[in-house]
Amino acid sequence: MSPLIQMHGITKSYQLWKEDLMVVKWIDIEIHDGEFVSIMGQSGSGKSTLMNIIWMLDNPSTGTYIFNGRDVSWLTDDDQALIRRQNIGFIFQSYNLLPRTSALHQVVMPLIYQGVWKKERTERAIEALQKVGLANKINNLPNEMSGGQQQRVSIARALVTNPSIILADEPTGALDSKTGVEIMELLTELNKEGKTVIVITHEHEVDAFAKRHILLRDGNIVT
Ligand SMILES: Nc1ncnc2c1ncn2[C@@H]1O[C@H](COP(=O)(O)OP(=O)(O)O)[C@@H](O)[C@H]1O
Ligand SMILES: [Mg+2]
């Protein structure tokens, strides 16, 4: 089977004053359906930059990106956004929940964008919240939940569209270590059920949950 994600000669440079600063350097990556991969590296090694290229929030400066057999390097932002919304669920270090919005509505939101009808989206959001162990918190606001619970809401929000890939950028970075382990166990469970999980981290405790490890140093992959 062809890889889900195939990257060739990917670089990313930022223009600073007169010179270019290359922060991702000639990366080749293949990730297959069902893998649990970590992208590990110290702060500043280019992890988030690479992650933003993977979920098509940002384009590389050079290189080819094949997603699900299709060259997405030259698609318009709208076409990339469509592929992203249909295939990728994203989890942020800082949860990125809306304030003054119930857990249920946070999880319903992506389905509104997809044009799912009200009854179905409520059912699917409740199901996703049950899946992450928050059946009794659906009406709670973010400030009425612990950090771990808020991260679970964000995982439910990532899951509700039934993406094939879950991308997580430092998902435990704001949590204590016990809660962090619980979140990683949840991601492990989702991987066992068939989701491709890509987690970026600088922590060995998080990295240990992955089955394959990509190490970034100064924008390069080191093996
Ligand atoms: N928009 C930007 N403009 C200039 N430099 C940037 C920009 N975004 C990131 N960088 C630089 O790129 C390098 C890699 O950043 P990043 O991908 O966030 O690393 P990590 O996630 O591994 O901490 C850093 O040196 C950072 O300062
Ligand atoms: Mg980062």
Image: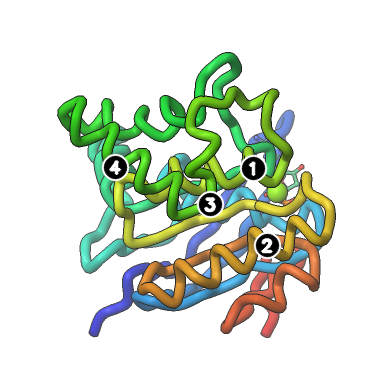
**Residue 181 position in % (x across, y down):** 72, 65
Q: How would you rate the neighbour count of disc 4 (Cα within 10 Å): few for under 14, some for 14-19, many for 20 or more?
A: many
Q: Secondary structure at mark 3?
A: loop
Q: Secondary structure at mark 2?
A: helix
Q: Nearer the viewer, mark 3 or mark 1?
A: 3
> Which of the labelled discs sits on residue 8, or is there none?
none
Identify the residue under disc 3.
133
Quadrant hosting ligand 1: top right
Q: How would you rate the neighbour count of disc 3 (Cα within 10 Å): few for under 14, some for 14-19, many for 20 or more?
A: some
Q: Which badge, 4 or 3, is on the more N-terminal residue?
A: 4
Query: Residue at position x 49%, y 61% from top?
Result: 10
Disc 3 to disc 2, C-alpha distance:
11 Å
Query: Residue at position x 58%, y 14% from top?
Result: 100
Disc 3 to disc 1, C-alpha distance:
9 Å
Identify the residue under disc 4.
124
**In front here: 186 or 91?**
186
Q: How would you rate the neighbour count of disc 1 (Cα within 10 Å): few for under 14, some for 14-19, many for 20 or more?
A: many
**In front here: 6 or 177?**
177
**Residue 25 position in % (x across, y down):** 61, 63
| 39 lies above or below 114 | below
Q: Is residue 56 left or right of residue 149?
A: left
Q: Which badge, 1 or 4, is on the more N-terminal residue?
A: 4
Q: Which badge, 2 or 1, is on the more N-terminal residue?
A: 1
Image quadrant where one finds the C terminus: bottom right
Identify the residue under disc 1.
149
Disc 2 to disc 4, C-alpha distance:
23 Å
Identify the residue under disc 2.
182
What amino acid is at disc 2?
Glu
What amino acid is at disc 3?
Gly
Disc 4 to disc 3, C-alpha distance:
14 Å
